[in-house]
Structures are given as C-alpha cells and as structure tokens.
Image: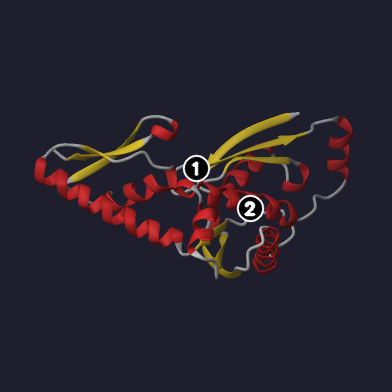
Amino acid sequence: MRSIEISARTVAEATRLALEQLGVDEDEAMIAVLQVGDEENEALVRVSVDDAPVEAATTLSEPRRARPPFDPQAAGGYARELLEGILEHMGLEGYVNVEYAIEPGPEGEDQHSIQLDVEGLDEETVGLMIGRRGETLRSLQFLLNTIVNRSAGRWPQIVVDVGNYRQRRRDSLEGLARRVAEQVRTTGRALPLEPMQSYDRRIVHMTLRDDGSVYTESNGEGENRRIVVHPRR
C-alpha cells in the first residue's frame, strides 16, 4: 500500500497533485480528506493505492476508465436535498437557495463552487445553526461536502450560509481590521486582536495586505491563535 499526503489551495487541487505523483486515476485510489481548505489554511488530503500484484495486472491489461464529467447542477441539487432533509429532521421550516460560481482552477480547469443559503428562519434558530464563532455552520458545511463528494466523485467546494452570516461577518471583520490599523498608525505600537478561527483571520490578513503602513502576523496555537497588527518601520 502506497500513501501520500498533499496540501494545496483546494481539496480538488490537492487530490489531483497526489494522483499525479502516484501515477493513478481517481477511481484507482482511496482518498481521505484530512482538512478542508479555507481562505487561510490549505486543504490536506491523503491518497492511498493498493499495489497488490493482482490489481497491478488488471490495471495493465485494461484501459483506465475516464473520470466522469462533473455536473455542478446535479451536485447542487443533491446538496440542497440533503440540507433540506436536515432542516426537516430538526423541525425547521426554512428553505434553501442554491447559487453556482466558476473560477479558473489549476491547469485551466474550472473550479466549481456551490453556495447554499438557508433562509426563512427566526433569529434564534439562525444563531443555533451558526454556533459559537460559526463552528456549527462549518461542521454542517464539511458534512455536506463529504457526502456529495462520495456521490459525485469530486470535491465540489460547497459553502453553506445562514441568515447572510458570512457576508455580515466579513463586513464586520474588515471594519475591525481598518479601525485597528488606524490605531496602530496613530500610536506606532502593535495591537493584538481577539483569538479567531482561521477563516476569520484570513479576512483580516487580506483586508490589510495592501496597506503600506501596517503588516499582520498570526501568533499562538489552536483556539488561542490571534492576529497582531504591527506598524511598518
């Protein structure tokens, strides 16, 4: 059994790189997603191949099967059904809207993303689904990605949002980053922010990356990891 772990910007890209290094097709390997990539941390996958002689002989004698084309509409529809089923089992009457986006991926391949927006919930229920610092929402998103990946054979980059939380959170963090940067410019002293999840830290980093008067770095471990904004000397 050969096994390799590869990190990249997305699960799809990490998987592709690992398969290339092992010299096999996707349907010949066992793929485990160890970490879903976000805007700061790269995705991490482990790809394993059974090199038993019988399997090798079969591979040499038979042509490799072409990977089936990815159907984002089908994947999005399936993800929507799954999420609506979860809402139903929770006794919630919200509804799910689906949006599709395409951006250039590695080697010119299209990278599909599917956004599921849950609407029609009251404020208390929205807070329940989001969880502390968005942890419940991220767990739900990981679950849907995993299930749809097994069905579609691709990692489709599904994003789940409830009550426009992600956009509101982004706007709040961008405003915080600019206010802290102004304080740092005025005082000339570094200022730490409160501990944040990696997704939130990435938003702060991206907001200030082109600011010539300050720079950011992350310090700490685990839940105590935070951003410090420094003045440029």
Q: Mark 2: which amino acid?
A: Asn
Determine the residue positioned at 63% across, 68% down. Answer: 93
Q: Which residue is mark 2?
A: 145
Q: Mark 1: which amino acid?
A: Glu
Crowding at dot 2, Cα within 10 Å, few <14 / some 14-19 / many 20+, comes out as many
In the rendered image, which quarter contains the N terminus? top right
Determine the residue positioned at 33% across, 53% down. Answer: 173
What is the secondary structure assignment of the residue under circle 1? loop
Q: Nearer the viewer, residue 99 or 152?
A: 99
Q: Which residue is mark 1?
A: 42
Crowding at dot 1, Cα within 10 Å, few <14 / some 14-19 / many 20+, comes out as some
Numbered circles on residues, count: 2
Report the Cα–Cα distance between label 2 and label 1. Answer: 16 Å
Whole-percent x and y of residue 118?
56, 65
Determine the residue positioned at 32% across, 47% down. Answer: 205
Q: Report the side of 196 relative to 65 (left or right).
A: left
Whole-percent x and y of residue 212?
18, 48
